[in-house]
Image (spheres, rainbow, N blue to C red):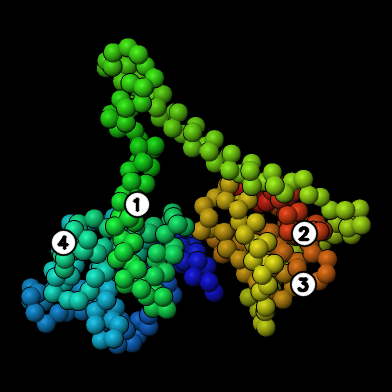
Amino acid sequence: MEFQDRIAALASKVSNQSASIGTEEATKNAFVMPFIASILGYDVFDPLEVVPEYTADVGIKKGEKIDYAIMRDAEVQILIECKASTGVPKIEHASQLFRYFATTNARIAALTNGVVWQFYTDLDAPNRMDAKPFLVLDLLDIDETLIPEVQKLSKESFDLESIINAAEELKYVGALKREIAGQFREPSDEWIKFFAQRVYEGSYTARVREQFTALVTKASRQFLTESVNDRLKVALGAGVSVAPTDASPSVISSIAPAQDDIDRDTEIETTLEELEGYQIVKAIACGETKPHRITHRDAKSYFAVLLDDNNRKPIARLHFNSRQKYLGLLDELKSETRHPLQDLDDIYAHADAIREAVLRYR
């Protein structure tokens, strides 16, 4: 499974189970250990790789421990401190991380509640953990631009020099993006005044501030909506004009099997065309839901695109195992209609039906 797919699978699990996780220990077992194992690629049961309840030899208050230390070549590389998933991870709760960071060789520290992962290093002062993270990964709202940076922390791709070199830019770009997002959600007085004074020629009075609070909020949301719509129009416009030729076989309808065969199929070979088709369906479906919720599973008979990695929430099926390729779309009764494809761009012609499939499960 590709790195991005592993993150999507864990994100789906977090989305489905976070409401039922109430303690720190449950958070570790359900979310943190799977992240260390499946995302970072370390063996959580090998003490040469992952040490739970890690205690340094010197310089630490007696009896104080870090939840996990990830080792490479017998040296601590990453320290991880956990909090319950019901709370928001705050740097005020990470006093152990600060102390251990100064007394070990670790250059990377992580504070997490299993849902949000905050990664720290020592950009501001050598061997002293920064007060602000350089990378924040929210599994319920994944910023896909961060996935390559997270992959650098994994066992197979660990590159400390590259991580540190990119950390400063990541730190400030990430902080700026979060600040901008916050201003779009709930604009501050400074943000409102900044824009009001550029379009309003009168004095900036309390009445004007009250008026422009609503106007700036509305304009910000409309701008975001229009930007997303413009990108979708560009993406969909490239493919809508492509239609099957008259020689295409007729549309085939069938009833979807009552028992999905995805789980029991073996000896499956996923092709590049199937993955390309999946990316097209995912791009369309993302107009109605977050990208990490769109997943796939391959089977002998077809390649399934699912919502939340759930067999009961099929968005589309790619029948690419014969010379004539089909896009399978299912209605409310799970009755499948196969549409012939001359090439992958033909999928865009069914964008409305794909989006409708996603909306049915919401």
Q: Secondary structure at mark 4?
A: loop
Q: CA distance from mark 2 to mark 4?
A: 55 Å
Q: Report the mark closest to the observer, 2 or 4.
A: 4
Where does the image place residue 69, in percent across and percent down from the top left? 26, 77
Q: CA distance from mark 3 to mark 2?
A: 14 Å
Q: Report the mark closest to the observer, 3 or 4.
A: 4
Q: Secondary structure at mark 3?
A: loop
Q: Report the mark closest to the observer, 1 or 4.
A: 4
Q: Which residue is mark 2?
A: 343
- What amino acid type is highlighted by mark number 2? Asp
In the visual, does 352 lie left or right of 282? Answer: right
154 or 8: which is nearer to us?
154
Q: Which residue is mark 3?
A: 321
Q: Which residue is mark 4?
A: 125
Q: Report the mark closest to the observer, 3 or 1.
A: 1
Q: CA distance from mark 3 to mark 1?
A: 42 Å
Q: Give the label on residue 174, or none.
A: 1
Q: CA distance from mark 2 to mark 1?
A: 38 Å
In the visual, does 90 lie left or right of 300? Answer: left
Of labels 3 and 4, earlier in sequence is 4
- What amino acid type is highlighted by mark number 3? Asn
- What amino acid type is highlighted by mark number 4? Ala
Q: Residues within 10 Å of mark 4 (few under 14, many from 20)?
A: few
Of labels 3 and 1, earlier in sequence is 1
